[in-house]
């Protein structure tokens, strides 16, 4: 198969790494890719949001399957354009991608089909939003309806903060048109985990769980980021909890999407809050998580290309028995440029990657690198590397990952030192 992968982050490096080992993979292109991805794919200089050039490239190269990494091209309709040309694509069409692209769409679907999620209101009018906030009995979270690169959620300490957040979003100042509507929802107190499942429009194939670390600094302090590290499986996960997530949340969502005439194809990534042992849906993403994907790919046993291709072709039911997972824990530590998620320098040199990548049970996924001189790499983004380890326990994976981190010389970068800490702490105290 000729395969085109879209994206340029650590998630895409992990996908490219797994896809390139498939016997079915004749050639793998990645647009635009990064310096790490070049080791397992042919990078093409087309941006992930340049839908026309991507579609043209897929046609010219007679691509058999396009796999879309990030959400923006999905929400913008890349899958629709490809399907119109009879090119197979892994990822939802624009209508189904609204599960991520419009929080209001997702919440209304949950309300209509009785899927457990935080109580909410949806507003385009500031006065109505303020009245609703004033009537809420407890703390609230204010969310921009549209895509806001993970920044459109404000957890409010009091009503005044919530009113200001809603005002900011609705005025268009905070997130432009993504804030034209706001969701105001009940604050849920619990512990989060991420759950991933594949769908081909009708058949569901459960994947696995992970836990992300969204804040920039140790001890969950500092600003929210795209994710500073993850590990899989999540320590909260049990077979009983997984069953509840599937039967109360994922399965009804896929059925609802079929009934609404927008069957979902691709990967459904559920952000779940576990409150007193019960799963409640926080949000859906319609793509793999980054860096959760890096941990899933380390544990996946099976042919990723075969699996994703079956999902794209509506043939997941044929795959079901052949997917397996290592029972080890995978843990990914993100190294980011100093200053991230605020302003940071680019083009700073990184040494020691080769030695670190050669360590046992370690794989370094690049998220934002380019080639410099003499085999050196240069940083090109905020999140730059994902140092990913496999270990018999969370503690072992953690120790291997940080050992590899310590081989890397990058004075302009930083990482959290406590990835997986919630799991190792729970083990100690529990
Ligand atoms: P979202 O983009 O909707 O997942 O929100 C980003 C983060 O905000 C989540 O990962 C949670 O940590 C937090 N969050 C979102 N909604 C709620 C809620 N209703 N209660 C508590 N925390 C929330
Ligand atoms: N790590 C969270 C996300 O990919 O949305």
Image (tube, rainbow, N blue to C red):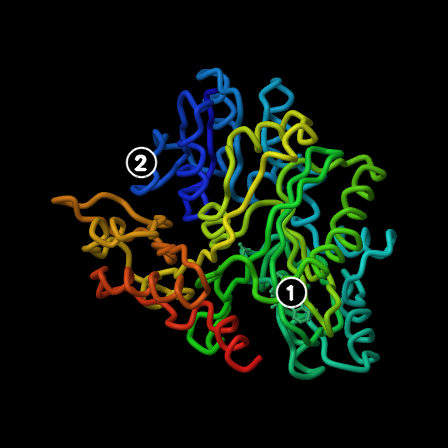
Q: Is residue 22 above or below residue 407?
A: above
The kind of secondary structure element at disc 1 is helix
Residue furthest left in the image = 374
The structure residue drawn at horizontal position 51% and vertical position 73%, both measured from the top left corner, is 422
- Identify the mark at residue 198; answer none if there is no mark: none
Q: Position of residue 239 (x, y in %)?
A: 68, 58
The structure residue drawn at horizontal position 55% and vertical position 47%, both measured from the top left corner, is 288
Q: Which residue is mark 1?
A: 169
Number of other residues with Cα within 10 Å of mark 2, as a class: few under 14, some 14 to 19, many 20 or more: some
Q: Position of residue 30 (x, y in %)?
A: 41, 33
N-terminal-most mark, 1 or 2: 2
- In which quadrant of the rendered view does residue 176 lie? bottom right
Between marks 1 and 2 in the image, the one whose residue lies nearer the viewer: 2
The structure residue drawn at horizontal position 57% and vertical position 62%, both measured from the top left corner, is 234
- Identify the mark at residue 38; answer none if there is no mark: 2
Q: Is residue 75 above or below residue 234?
A: above
Q: Could you tell me which quadrant the C terminus lies in?
A: bottom right
Number of other residues with Cα within 10 Å of mark 1, as a class: few under 14, some 14 to 19, many 20 or more: many
> Is residue 202 rendered to the left or right of residue 153?
right
Q: Nearer the viewer, residue 358 or 104?
A: 358
């Amino acid at each position: 198969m000729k395969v085109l992968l879209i994206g340029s982050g650590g998630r895409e490096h992990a996908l490219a790494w797994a896809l390139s080992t498939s016997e079915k993979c004749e050639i793998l292109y990645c647009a635009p890719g990064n310096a790490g991805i070049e080791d397992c794919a042919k990078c093409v200089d087309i941006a992930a949001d340049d839908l026309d050039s991507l579609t043209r490239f897929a046609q010219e190269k007679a691509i058999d399957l396009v796999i879309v990494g990030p959400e923006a091209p999905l929400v913008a309709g890349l899958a629709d354009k490809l399907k119109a040309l009879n090119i197979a694509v892994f990822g939802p069409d624009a209508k189904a991608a609204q599960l991520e692209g419009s929080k209001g769409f997702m919440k209304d679907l949950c309300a209509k089909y009785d899927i457990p999620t935080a109580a909410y209101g949806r507003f385009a009018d500031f006065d109505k939003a303020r009245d609703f906030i004033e009537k809420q009995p407890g703390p609230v979270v204010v969310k921009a309806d549209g895509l806001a690169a993970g920044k459109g959620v404000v957890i409010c300490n009091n009503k005044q903060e919530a009113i200001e957040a809603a005002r900011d979003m609705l005025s268009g100042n905070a997130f432009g048109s993504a804030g034209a509507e706001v969701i105001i929802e009940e604050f849920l107190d619990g512990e989060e985990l991420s759950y991933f499942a594949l769908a081909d429009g009708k058949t569901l194939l459960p994947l696995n769980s992970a836990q992300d670390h969204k804040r920039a600094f140790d001890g969950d302090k500092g600003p929210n980021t795209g994710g500073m590290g993850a590990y899989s499986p999540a320590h909260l996960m049990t077979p009983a909890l997984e069953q509840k997530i599937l039967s109360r949340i994922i399965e009804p969502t896929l059925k609802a999407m079929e009934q609404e005439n927008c069957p979902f194809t691709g990967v459904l990534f559920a952000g779940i809050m576990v409150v007193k042992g019960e799963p409640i849906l926080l949000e859906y993403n319609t793509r793999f998580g980054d860096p959760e994907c890096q941990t899933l790919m380390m544990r996946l046993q099976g042919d990723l290309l075969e699996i994703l291709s079956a999902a794209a072709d509506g043939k997941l039911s044929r795959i079901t028995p052949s997917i397996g997972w290592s029972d080890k824990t995978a843990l990914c530590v993100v190294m980011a440029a100093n200053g991230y998620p605020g302003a940071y320098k680019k083009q700073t040199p990184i040494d020691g990657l080769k030695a670190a990548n050669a360590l046992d049970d370690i794989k370094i996924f690049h998220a934002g690198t380019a080639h410099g001189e003499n085999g050196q790499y240069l940083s090109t983004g905020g999140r730059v590397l994902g140092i990913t380890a496999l270990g018999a326990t969370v503690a072992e994976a953690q120790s291997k990952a940080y050992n590899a981190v310590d081989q890397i010389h990058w004075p302009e970068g930083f990482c959290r030192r406590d990835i997986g800490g919630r799991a190792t702490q729970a083990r100690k105290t529990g």
